[in-house]
């Protein structure tokens, strides 16, 4: 059973509005995203995030937090920092996010093509090593040596 909030509470800001106005410290963001404060300062130096300053203290907005999340995800996906910055900056040009999403889709497809090419190259290289392994093991057996034995011990 739910209980109605008292009249004074009904004028309070909703959680969504409150969260969008929340301020984060560098320590909070570092802890949340499992990175060092130095990493966050590096992204700031690179112009990827721009916290407000209060004296020497950095104050990160919900927007900065969201950008940091995108930066870290982009890095995990293999995007270069310059690419990430360009993608993030597109949102400043088109607040609907459509241009940003189209560019992200285009670049994601390019990355997929590159990764698939590298996977083919790795598969070919693995195949070559397996051939070498098979031939060398057969030659060792033909010479009366155990291919898995280590005589250097």
Image: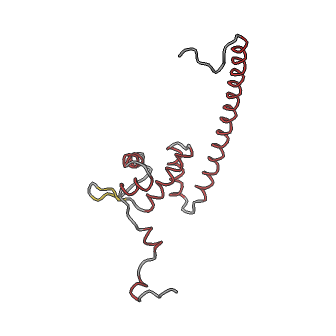
Dividing the picture into quarters, in which one does residue 118 lie? Answer: top right
Which residue is found at the position 26% from the left and 57% from the top? Answer: 55
Depth check, front residue: 101 or 42: 42
Which residue is found at the position 54% from the left and 51% from the top? Answer: 87
The percent position of residue 135, horizontal first and vertical second, equals 72, 18
Depth check, front residue: 81 or 15: 15
From the viewer's perspective, is residue 81 above or below residue 102?
above
Dividing the picture into quarters, in which one does residue 28 lie? Answer: bottom left
Which residue is found at the position 41% from the left and 80% from the top? Answer: 12
Depth check, front residue: 101 or 124: 124
Q: In the image, 1: left or right of 138?
A: left
Depth check, front residue: 60 or 2: 2
The percent position of residue 102, horizontal first and vertical second, equals 63, 54
From the viewer's perspective, is residue 9 above or below residue 82?
below
Which residue is found at the position 52% from the left and 45% from the top? Answer: 75
Residue sticking out furthest to the left: 55
> By what rule are the colours in the image chosen?
secondary structure
The mark total stands at 0
The percent position of residue 67, horizontal first and vertical second, equals 48, 55
The percent position of residue 73, horizontal first and vertical second, equals 53, 50
Dividing the picture into quarters, in which one does residue 112 lie? Answer: top right
């Amino acid at each position: 059973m739910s209980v109605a909030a008292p009249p004074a509470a009904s004028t309070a800001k909703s959680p969504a509005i409150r969260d969008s106005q929340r301020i984060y410290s560098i320590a909070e963001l570092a802890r949340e995203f499992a990175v060092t404060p130095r990493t966050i300062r590096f992204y700031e130096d690179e112009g990827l995030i721009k916290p407000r300053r209060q004296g020497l203290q950095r104050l990160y907005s919900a927007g900065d937090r969201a950008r940091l999340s995108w930066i870290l995800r982009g890095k995990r996906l293999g995007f270069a920092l310059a690419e990430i910055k360009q993608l993030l900056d597109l949102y400043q040009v088109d607040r609907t996010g459509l241009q940003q999403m189209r560019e992200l889709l285009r670049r994601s497809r390019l990355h997929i093509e590159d990764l698939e090419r590298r996977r083919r190259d790795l598969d070919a290289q693995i195949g070559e090593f397996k051939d070498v392994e098979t031939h060398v093991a057969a030659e060792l057996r033909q010479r009366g040596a155990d291919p898995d034995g280590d005589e250097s011990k």
